[in-house]
Image: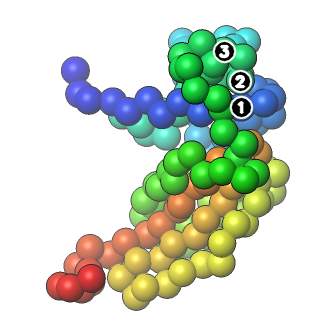
Amino acid sequence: MKTKIFLNLAVKDLNKAISFFTEIGFSVNSQFTNEKGACIVIDENINVMILVEEFYKTFTKKQICDTATTSEVLISISLDSREKVDEMIEKAIKAGGVDYIPAKDYGWMYQRTFLDVDGHHWEVFYMDESKIPNEM
């Protein structure tokens, strides 16, 4: 079996979160979805488990952070082009997310940021690896 990543995020409203992620182009794996959580498929090896807060709390002794004031994680996703980055940001805004930080263009990498409906921080970027500077 290939290594897979299952990122777990607490959400307030499961149906609202599912709707958001499907509107921006991800799918749901119904095998790992019920009234407590859903498996959002980013690709065949990367998944996001969105778990209602009460269920999420069963996996940790720590408090759930307030994403309005605290950063818990920066989730970064590479896409195939600058246009796809812009398309995802526009879909995220239309689905209820927030265009969080202005676009950054480093010449070799183009990056934009959105917050999902629960305030989780997503970095979406396109990178042309052939143009990465020797020294950064």
- Residue 103 at what x, y percent from top left? 60, 78
* Image quarter of residue 43: top left
- Residue 56 at what x, y percent from top left? 62, 20
Q: Are marks 2 and 3 in contact (CB under 8 Å)?
A: yes
Check residue 53 in the rendering and tell me which mark sits there, or answer none.
2
The residue sitting at 72% across, 53% down in the picture is: 69
Which sits earlier in the primary sequence, circle 3 or circle 1?
Answer: 1
The residue sitting at 53% across, 60% down in the picture is: 123
For mark 1, what is the residue? Answer: 11
Label 3 and label 1: CA atoms lie apart by: 10 Å
Graded by Cα atoms within 10 Å as few (under 14), some (14 to 19) or many (20 or more), the crowding at tag 1 reads many
**Front one among 118 and 34:** 118
- Residue 87 at what x, y percent from top left? 64, 65
Q: As shown in the figure, which amino acid type bears the numbered disc 1?
A: Val
For mark 3, what is the residue? Answer: 55
The residue sitting at 72% across, 66% down in the picture is: 99
Res 116 seen here: no
Graded by Cα atoms within 10 Å as few (under 14), some (14 to 19) or many (20 or more), the crowding at tag 2 reads some
Circle 3: element type: helix
Graded by Cα atoms within 10 Å as few (under 14), some (14 to 19) or many (20 or more), the crowding at tag 3 reads some
Res 102 seen here: yes
